[in-house]
Image (cartoon, rainbow, N blue to C red):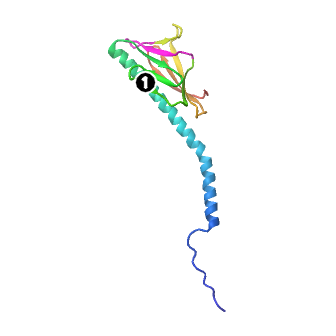
Amino acid sequence: MKAFNRPIQTGFTLIELLVTISVLGIIASIAAPSFQNQIAKRKMEDAFSQIETCFKESRIEANITRSPVTVRFNTQTLNCATKGNIEFAPPLSVVAVRGTPSIRFNANGTVNFVGASSATLEETFQICYNDYAQGSIDLTINSRGRLSRNTGGRTC
């Protein structure tokens, strides 16, 4: 009787490669939306930081120059009077929840909400990103210029 010697197999067969690539494709399709949400959330956090910094810089500028500094909101841009314009990408929307279009920082550190009633002691701005449907960040500023953050579950 003659013994058959099988050659040693190296590498993968075509079937094994197809199965492996299919499994990796399924895993990638499950993970991709999660990554997109993280990217959108990060963009919303960046926008919040820019707006917060603009408010702080405006308040400091008003104190240093002893003259009022006004920050105006638009749905597409934030006009920060101290450093020119800070423009956000089109999918970002900054929404004044109670409708105050601008904030004036006075030389003494107080804040006036232009367009709101004189009795308004604080104003909340809702920061949204269109690609992130899981909520928003609320930035509240009081009449003394203090900022607070609330990660709300509200949608825009």
Please name the residue shown 47% across and 32% down the image.
Answer: 46
Give the residues drawn in magenta, as a range: 98-111
Is residue 89 highlighted in magenta? Answer: no
Q: As drawn, which residue projects farthest toward the bottom?
A: 1
Instruction: Name the outermost residue toward the left.
Output: 64
Q: Locate residue 127 relative to residue 106 in the image: left or right.
A: right
Q: Residue at x 50, y 25 (%)?
A: 149
Residue at the image position 57 percent from the left and 77 percent from the top: 8
- Looking at the picture, how far across and down is residue 2, in whole percent? 64, 91
Q: Quadrant of residue 19?
A: bottom right
Instruction: Measuring from the top left, give residue 141's x and y in whole percent.
Output: 48, 19
| Three-letter code for the amino acid on which mark 1 is drawn | Asn
Percent from the top left, x then y, of residue 151? 54, 28
Secondary structure mostly seen in magenta is loop
Quadrant location of residue 52?
top left
Q: Which quadrant of the figure has residue 134?
A: top right
Residue designated by label 1: 85
Does 66 appear above or below 54?
A: above
Q: Secondary structure at mark 1?
A: strand
Does residue 107 show up magenta in the picture? yes
State the residue at coordinates (37%, 15%).
62
Q: Is residue 30 above or below residue 22?
A: above
Q: Position of residue 150 (x, y in %)?
A: 53, 26
Placement of the N terminus among the 4 image quadrants? bottom right
Q: Mark 1: few, some, or many residues within 10 Å (few <14, many ≥20)? A: few
